[in-house]
Image (tube, rainbow, N blue to C red):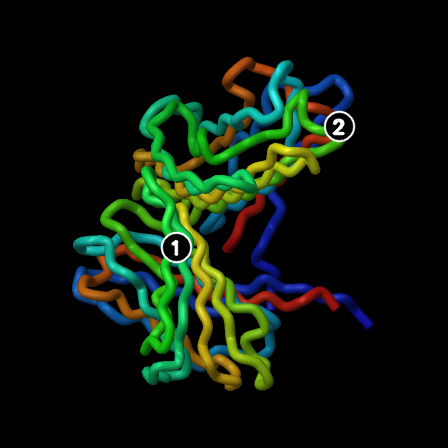
Amino acid sequence: MALQLFKIATVTVGSAGASTIDFTSIPQGYTDLMLAYSVRVNRSGTTFTQLGMRVNGASTNYSTTTLSGNGSTVTSSSNITGYFGYESSSMNSTNSTGNTFSSGQIYIPNYTSSNNKSALIDFVAEQNATAANAILSVALWSNTAAITSIALNEPNNNSNFDQYTTATLYGIL
Amino acid sequence: MAKTATYSLISSQTTSGSSTTVITFSSIPQTFTDLVLVVNGTAVSGGPDLKYTFNSDTGSNYARIAFYGTGSAAFVARDINQTGTNTGYLGTSNTTNILNVPDYSNTTTYKNIVARINAAIYLGTWRSTAAISSITLTIVSSSYASGCTFKLYGIEAYK
């Protein structure tokens, strides 16, 4: 049977770092999208910081519900922000243990449909030190447009993604 | 020997109208390693559970543990000896469920379901050693809205 999980594009950050990771002109011939990433940023003075993701350049109509645990406490929160799944991420940053990257996966079904777009987001940030985060989230973009682009950044301080950060976008039929 | 790996769409269904309450995938091929079921859509009303049964077994052979957040608090729930495993959910805004059923065709062990839905993770168990040949999704006390999609994939391990 034919393979129906296809790699659309991979971005690997080089030694100069990168302020954004962009997937543009996303093919519209798949059914679902899956974005998998391993990330670290150079935001100073922080152990973890949020990942910002926007689709089609939109800065509004996002909402997120999150379940998170840090090894001692479990919390749940809801947010309406300018980013898709803003509170559903926790990227390793400058003060986290060296060479540790956080990992996440976003699944967006029916990304070309004329319905609003929901996504399941799983994110983990471990650094073999006191602080860590495991996050399960659902995010909603209340917009009926097909998703044609995805952009990632660090929105709190506009820090750069560190070298060896990777993000891969898959299309699923 | 040539290496192969597949992530294949076995079958898909899309609801029309607003009266459908049961979705069934039958005659599931036994040639894959794991199953993945992706459900996306909305319920006509409320926030109903989706109840899964396998091979038409409606006996009290199912259990579930759920770990979920509502946006203001975190909860855990546990059910045993149920007539289906409530490891799904649809709201009235667009909702996604992803179910994984690993090693579904084995005839030695009970079957587990790992489901991601919203800010939640559910684990269900079907106490049967039979290979899974059919999956039925029943929406509880509501119906599927038009345009709900149900996609069943088979994953075959890289050999």
Amino acid type, callout 2: Gly
Whole-number angstrom distance, CA of label 1 to CA of label 2: 35 Å
Quadrant location of the N terminus of chain A? bottom right
Q: Residue A139's mark?
A: none
Q: Position of residue A143 (x, y in %)?
A: 31, 34
Label 2 sits on residue: A98
Residue B76 image label: 1
Q: Nearer the viewer, residue A130 or B105?
A: A130
Up-down: is A168 above or below B58?
above
Foreground: A103 or A25?
A: A103
Instruction: Give A27 or B145, whichever is nearer the viewer.
Output: B145
Asked if one can make out residue B10 in the rendered structure from this viewpoint, the answer is yes
In this figure, what is the number of numbered marks? 2
Q: Residue at x 48, y 46 (%)?
A: A107
Residue B65 x %, y %: 42, 63
Q: Chain of mark 1?
A: B
Chain of the residue under the numbered disc 2 shown in the image: A
